[in-house]
């Protein structure tokens, strides 16, 4: 993605760096403890799919106190061997898509991080659950409501935890925005604008609807949708939407290029949102309350987030000093904490399912008008 | 309006100050000439309605080379006398709403600036036209499509010009954004976000639907709507919208408090927009193209506009150094130039009518869902 820094610069975040964020309280409440556990006590993750997103997650675990990568699942053995060497993973803990189910007997693996194309989330979540492993699954949860429901059922019947990797819900700038809103600092929220998009390269699997389940809406628009929900603390009442294709250059034969939607929440809060695969659209959100406002821009990048807010007695300008892969560290720490203490994750399968239901409705109303 | 500086600080803009804008070309192309005309050659305006907006327009004419205020129309004679003294207007050129039609014989008056509540625009435009005076009418043009049509017909049959005071269409930062888009600098436009709103005081005439014709949509949302049209250079194909009232405190018994809409343009460009009377919502727009973006924030205030843009080879950061009432100066200069040279204004009645038609459609689809 052109707007995100793809290079993952591993930085071990120290307490001092956390403190610089000015929101240590929020971050600390999620993290179990900043004192490192012994390797045996850390939650061991098998990473399935060694692509871009996994390249953020894996180094992030090293910065956590409670998580480590203990197995890899890949169709590319050479790549897996190279990464295994970096993480001290024995060759016996490298799996492929055929022998993955034998991971059940690997005691170093407590959980599986599903970082595959969207269409494979449901199958590998179910197989991981059957193998008795907890599941941390990337967003979007799956490519249909039915798949999401089957994933929840599979994890429930296996007695394992399921969390959707909504990294922003573990990120201090977003948590700060939420806490400002809940505190009443900006008064009653009336309107929200949010957007996220980028100019996609031809040939990406995301353009293949069978693999992705949709276009920018499911991939990056979901950040704006999810944000509108956690910022308001409400569930959407109804949607209105349009989608379009402008560039008939072969990229958008299966999925939309642009999607614009508006949401009405039960309290009357309205959100106007945009997403695209055809333009640089730095992710942002603005929240307008009766007493002030919050503007986070960039909001959905891996680093460099910036919150500005104005309300009686305050004029905040809060750039995040956290560096990628901090967001992945925060989410891994949360899930490991839940696994170790038998707690329900803050973003369980049900949270992922909700967005997939809403996206299905957004597509339905957008297509009705087309 | 809480977000706009109500105090109008009269500043005579010099050539040097124009040049600081870095967009002199655009401004100069609208202005007839920066060398002052003799008073006899200047277009003489009768100002109808001596409220807030007129208090920006009147000092602005002093900064123009081709316009002056030569008459006042008001129900408050004391106020009119006070202002008349400031502008050297003879007492014989002060009218009230009853004797207004006798302005026909006042040779010092070439045009009328209609700065009345929205519901009075149609009547006074028609009476001005009948008196043989050109009409510069504030936005929104009127409170119904039928009224707009009657205003256009009245001016046409009287052989006078009609311009709607869309100040942003004469403002250099907006003109710069438009010219960047038309030049192809940011590639093909895909998506736009725009918003404008403010927290309204109880008791304002704008909350009385008979006088205003609607809520924030007709008053300030119209800026976002109009911008989406001049930025794209296209006419909307369809709208989807929601409206709501959150604050049941007596302000919103007749008009909406919030309105969120999305527009589909024929090329496929999508715009997501918000307006409110319940929150600080600084006017802004963002335009996302295949090769770059433009972000203007604030966009719709009377001064302090700020354009940022990123596209191949450029990283623009362009704050406007023009001060209120510059925007009113620019629009007055344009209309006077048209009057003096028998040219059609850039924002004629038909332009105002279009927005009123679109707003009627936005209300229709918003109410359908309610």
Image (cartoon, coloured by chain):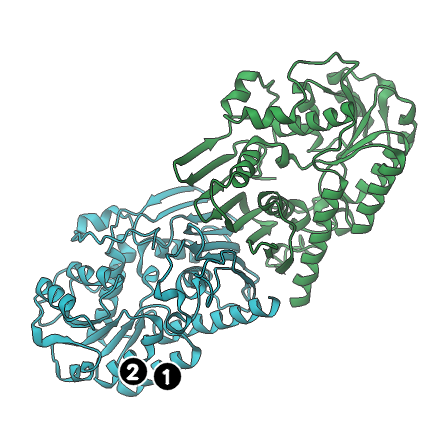
Chain colours: A green, B cyan
Q: CA distance from mark 2 to mark 1?
A: 8 Å
How many numbered callouts?
A: 2
Q: Chain of mark 2?
A: B
Q: Farthest front residue? A: B249
Q: Farthest bottom residue? A: B157
Residue B126: numbered disc: 2
Q: Is residue B116 left or right of residue B291?
A: left
Closer-to-camera residue (B86/B187): B86
Q: Position of residue A298 (x, y in %)?
A: 52, 39
CB under 8 Å between callouts 2 and 1? yes
Residue B150: numbered disc: 1
Q: Residues within 10 Å of mark 2 (few under 14, many from 20)?
A: many
Name the quarter where the N terminus of chain B is drawn. bottom left
Q: Chain of mark 1?
A: B
- Residue A8 visible at all: no
Q: Residue at x 35, y 85 (%)?
A: B153
In what element is the residue under mark 1?
helix
Q: Earlier in the sequence, mark 2 or mark 1?
A: 2
Q: Residue at x 27, y 69 (%)?
A: B115
In what element is the residue under mark 2?
helix
- Dividing the picture into quadrants, the one containing residue B27 is bottom left
Q: Position of residue A344 (x, y in %)?
A: 75, 33
Q: Is residue A7 left or right of residue B206?
A: right
Q: Position of residue A87 (x, y in %)?
A: 74, 17
Name the quarter where the C terminus of chain B is drawn. bottom right
């Amino acid at each position: 993605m052109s707007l995100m820094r793809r290079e993952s610069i591993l930085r071990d975040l120290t307490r001092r760096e956390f403190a610089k964020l000015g929101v240590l309280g929020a971050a600390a409440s999620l993290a179990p403890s900043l004192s490192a556990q012994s390797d045996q006590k850390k939650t061991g993750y098998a990473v399935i799919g060694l692509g871009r997103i996994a390249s953020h997650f894996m180094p992030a675990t090293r910065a956590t106190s409670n998580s480590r990568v203990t197995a890899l699942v890949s169709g590319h053995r050479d790549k897996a061997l190279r990464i295994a060497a970096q993480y001290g993973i024995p060759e016996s803990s490298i799996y492929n898509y055929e022998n993955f189910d034998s991971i059940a007997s690997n005691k170093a693996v407590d959980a599986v991080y599903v970082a595959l194309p969207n269409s494979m989330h449901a199958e590998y979540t179910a197989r991981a659950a059957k193998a008795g492993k907890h599941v941390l699954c990337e967003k979007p949860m799956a490519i249909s409501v039915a798949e999401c429901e089957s994933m929840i059922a599979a994890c429930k019947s296996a007695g394992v935890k399921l969390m959707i990797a909504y990294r922003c819900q573990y990120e201090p700038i977003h948590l700060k925005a939420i806490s400002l809103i809940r505190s009443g600092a900006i008064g009653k929220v009336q309107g929200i604008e949010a957007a996220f998009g980028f100019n996609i390269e031809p040939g990406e699997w995301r353009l293949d609807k069978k693999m992705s389940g949709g276009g920018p809406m499911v991939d990056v628009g979901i950040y704006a949708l999810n944000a509108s929900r956690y910022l308001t603390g409400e569930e959407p009442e109804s949607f209105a939407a349009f989608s379009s294709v402008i560039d008939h250059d072969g990229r958008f034969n299966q999925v939309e290029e642009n999607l614009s939607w508006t949401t009405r929440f039960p309290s009357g809060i309205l959100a106007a949102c945009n997403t695209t695969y055809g333009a640089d659209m730095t992710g942002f959100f603005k929240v307008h309350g009766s007493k002030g406002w919050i503007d986070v821009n960039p909001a959905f990048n891996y680093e460099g987030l910036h919150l500005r807010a104005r309300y009686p007695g305050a004029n905040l300008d809060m750039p995040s000093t956290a560096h990628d892969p901090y967001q992945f560290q925060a989410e891994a720490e949360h899930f490991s904490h839940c696994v170790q203490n038998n707690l329900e994750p803050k973003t369980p399968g049900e949270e992922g399912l909700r967005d997939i239901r809403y996206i299905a409705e957004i597509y339905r109303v957008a297509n009705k008008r087309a």
